[in-house]
Image (cartoon, rainbow, N blue to C red):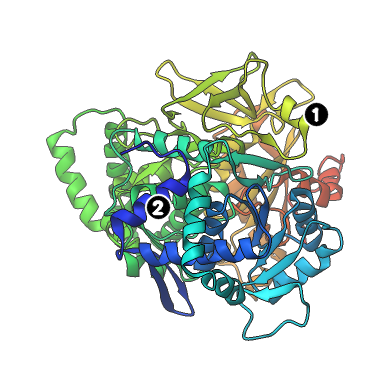
Amino acid sequence: MTAETTINQVFRNRVARYGERLAVEKKRNGRWEQASWTEYYDRSRNAGLGLHALGVSRGDRVALLSENRLEWLYSDMGALGIGASLVPLYPTLVADEVGHIVQDSGAKVFIVENRAQLDKALDAREMCPDLQKIVVIHDDAERFEDPDVLSFEDLMTLGRGQGREGEALFETFSSSVGPDDLATIVYTSGTTGVPKGAMITHGNIISVLHSLDNIEPRYAFDTDQTVPFLPLSHVFERVAGHFYGMYVGITASYAENVETLLHDIQEKRPTLILAVPRVCEKVYQRIMMQVKEQPAWRQKVFYWGHDIGARISRLKEEQQSIPLFLGLRYRIAYALIFKKLKEALGGRVRWMTASGAPTAPEIIRFFNAAGIVVVEGYGMTECTAPATMSNLAHYRIGTVGKALPGVEIRLDDDGEILVRGGNVFRGYWNMEAETRDAFTEDGFLRTGDMGILSDEGFLRIVDRKKDLIITSGGKNISPQKIENLFMGDPLFSFVVVIGDRKKHLTALVNINLEEAADLAGKRGLTLSAREDLLENPGVIVLVNDHVETLNSHLARYETIKRFTIVKHAFSKETGELTDTLKIKRSIIREKYQDVIDAMYAEEAPSPAVVS
């Protein structure tokens, strides 16, 4: 078979191979909407021909603002099929951000999910001279008086109406796309500054797919099934999930939403799960909270098994044989403890990812002991998602694995991670100076991340170059290391370490109210409503005790000297987190600057509580 050089070729070839087999499905209102490979292609072709009828040509941009749904996939593959490039937007973006991206990308057509997203599009339209039409996916049978607004069904009707001639035209368009053609412009959600549009080609995507497919043992087979729940608007889910799944021939059953995720996983019983560290942390914290509610003897059994599992995980990591007696004890521990975790995730999961941020080693070892290998990886939008991945058989917990086949990793003199390979993007849309600054003279991408490379080639992420804290005493400190330690304690939901150019470290923390209530009850504290927990002096003392315990695991200059409990929960909806649940440090610092200043005042109380 001729080597595939575009995602369009991959799509056509998989449709020819799998035909009427189930390709994708999405749960909506408790029911699964499905599409076979043939149906997937037919609907994508209709969407693409509909876009062509609206004036979209090769090289044009189509913007898409929607949660995960089948129409998202049809729009994506339809736009790519006619040689256009898709510009995905996060559904959480506000109107001004939406307007900037649509205007900057020069999108001709803007596909939005519902009335709420349509309102953003209409607000932004005045600043987008290239925008000609807005398509609404879910219109509740509403007809639009605006002549430039039409429903998704109208778009599909336009495509179907072109008949056999249209089908032949779509094949011509699809086949004419080459590896150097732009497939997508992904605007970095980022943690600072104005979003920048990363230009990703078909060749970039194919390079990643080939790299993943050349790693042994193989990550996936066409008998595998996933239950995706991360946003398709993020390059990780779209490339490592959607496109890699298409490349392998995996069936994807998109979860209805985060609230139904566990039920959907138990129903569909996936073999692979793409997740971010926060998901693993929440599952682990939930288990630890449940353990604390058990009788003392059950807790003792759990921690015995937990220790056995950690020892087994370390031996596997070091590729050492397991002593017979330890293996027998592990079989008991698995039956009593770890099997329940695997069954809670459907019972068939072989591996799951925890990429994008550090994950506590004890959490990874816990999942590994349950027979679920946690795959750590590293990448960024500019690398078309992954640049490194853990090998399923040869890995080092706490590292992000080795460079993918065909990818070069080296460290600059100051420790910055540099990347070169077919996965590295073309540059930033409409930003020549920023594109030049993104590369070294010999063509390596400057990632802005600091790392350490072992002699074996395993990469360890130290921190973001611009996030490194340099105290007034000259100590270089990684805030992520400290935050990662705190996040291993179920009491903390989020922790943001502060201290650049200061004499000591402070922190803003979110508290897990459920865990706090449970711990307070065990201390015999009299509590009122849960939302008033953080007004209780006894609870504040409890939190402070946990901070002191965690500080004992840190070097003196790394300890948190003062902290403030922020009652408002950080979230992507209120702007403190990215869509992949990473902290937006600059936003938080700006939002809570008065609180931060107060922590560094001479007579500052610690801890303090703010709304």
Disc assigned to residue 12: 2
For the C terminus, give its image quadrant: bottom right
Q: Residue at x 27, y 34 (%)?
A: 316
For the N terminus, give its image quadrant: top left
Asked where in the image residue 154 lies, by quadrant, the reply is bottom right
Q: Secondary structure at mark 1?
A: loop
Q: Position of residue 219 (x, y in %)?
A: 33, 42
Name the N-terminal-most of marks 2 and 1.
Answer: 2
Q: Position of residue 429 (x, y in %)?
A: 72, 40
Q: Tell which of 183 and 384 is nearer to you.
A: 183
What residue type is disc 1 on?
Arg
Question: Is residue 503 in view from this perspective?
Answer: no
Picture layout, residue 142 above or below residue 411: below
Asked where in the image residue 471 lies, by quadrant, the reply is top right
Q: Residue furthest front?
A: 165
- Whether residue 275 sits left or right of residue 106 in the image: it is left
Q: Residue at x 73, y 50 (%)?
A: 607
Q: How far is the residue under mark 2 from the one under mark 1?
A: 56 Å
- Whether residue 391 sits left or right of residue 141 in the image: it is left
- From the image, state whether disc 2 or disc 1 is nearer to you: 2
Q: How many marks?
A: 2
Question: Is residue 543 in view from this perspective?
Answer: yes
Q: Residue furthest top?
A: 413
Residue under label 1, please give it: 501
Q: Position of residue 173 (x, y in %)?
A: 53, 51
| Dot 2 crowding, Cα within 10 Å, few <14, some 14–19, many 20+ | some
Disc assigned to residue 91: none
Asked where in the image residue 254 lies, by quadrant, the reply is bottom left
What residue type is disc 2 on?
Arg
Picture layout, residue 280 above or below residue 68: above
Q: Tell which of 535 and 108 is nearer to you.
A: 108
